[in-house]
Each structure stands twice: as C-alpha cells, then as structure tokens.
Image (cartoon, rainbow, N blue to C red):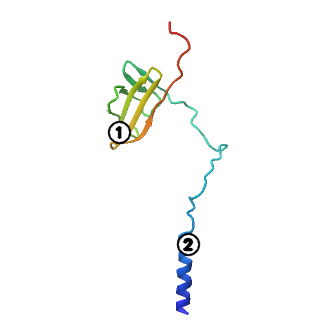
Amino acid sequence: MIRISALCLALCAGVVACAQSPFDGTWKTNMAQTKFSPKPNVFYLSQGWYHCVTCNPAFDSKADGNDQTVAGQSYDTISVKEVDPNTLSVTTKKAGKAPAKKKPSTAASKTKPN
C-alpha cells in the first residue's frame, strides 16, 4: 500500500512539474484601462548642452558624446551626441551597462528660418 501511494505521489509530482507557469502564454493589454502620461517628453539641445526639462529632477548635460554623470535618475551616466540637425544619439548607463539607447529625431523643417 505504501508503494502504491509513493508511486501515485511520484506520478502526480511529475505532472505538476511539467505544468505551465501562470505567466506563460500570450498577454493582452486592455487599452481601455491603460493610462499614459499626458505630458510629452521635453528636451532640447542648445549650444552643445542637452537639457531634459521633464526629467524628475530636470538636468543639463554636455552633448559631446562622452559619458556625463547625472544624479537623481534611474541611470548613473548619460551620453548625448548630435547625429545630424534632426537626430540625437542618447545612451544611458547604470553601473557601466547600457540598458537604453535612443535616437530621438524630429522632422526636417520645411520653412527656412529668418
């Protein structure tokens, strides 16, 4: 009787071990319940400096392509470089690793500045 119980227990344990995790499968987002920040990200480049206005706290950093230390952010350093007049290359690093690389860009202006 003990052998049969042990055998059943071993078989059940094997089945449970093979079961899917509750996190497996396809996740679907209900967009009706999703809330996005109504505020846009505001940043600009001026005279070789990158200014992040909507960062909390806001900060300014040299835009020379080298790592610059920042405080109060989820990253330790930021590297900003102007790729062309409409595109920036922004790389943030935490503990020396680069989890985020972005290339924000704007559309070229169709009017000539005065």
Q: CA distance from mark 1 to mark 2?
A: 43 Å
Horizontal and vertical percent position of residue 17: 53, 71
Q: Nearer the viewer, mark 1 or mark 2?
A: 2
Q: Which residue is mark 2?
A: 16
Between 43 and 112, which is closer to the camera in this rendering?
Answer: 112
Residue lying furthest front in this view? 84
Is 8 above or below relative to 86? below
Secondary structure of the residue carrying tag 2 is helix
Q: Residue at x 37, y 34 (%)?
A: 78
Which of the image's four quarters has the N terminus? bottom right
Residue lying furthest bottom in this view? 1
Q: Residue at x 43, y 22 (%)?
A: 84
Q: Residue at x 49, y 26 (%)?
A: 105
Secondary structure of the residue carrying tag 1 is loop
Horizontal and vertical percent position of residue 85: 45, 20
Quarter-of-image position of residue 95: top left
Q: Residues within 10 Å of mark 2 (few under 14, many from 20)?
A: few
**Residue contact at pointers 1 and 2, CB within 8 angstroms:** no
Quarter-of-image position of residue 22: bottom right
Residue lying furthest right in this view? 32
Mark 1 / mark 2, whichever is N-terminal: 2
Horizontal and vertical percent position of residue 90: 41, 32
Between 113 and 33, which is closer to the camera in this rendering?
Answer: 113
Horizontal and vertical percent position of residue 107: 54, 22
Three-letter code, disc 1: Asp
Q: Is residue 68 left or right of residue 3?
A: left
Three-letter code, disc 2: Val
How many numbered discs sit on the rendered protein? 2
Is 95 above or below relative to 6? above
Any mark on residue 76, and which? 1
Q: Residues within 10 Å of mark 1 (few under 14, many from 20)?
A: some
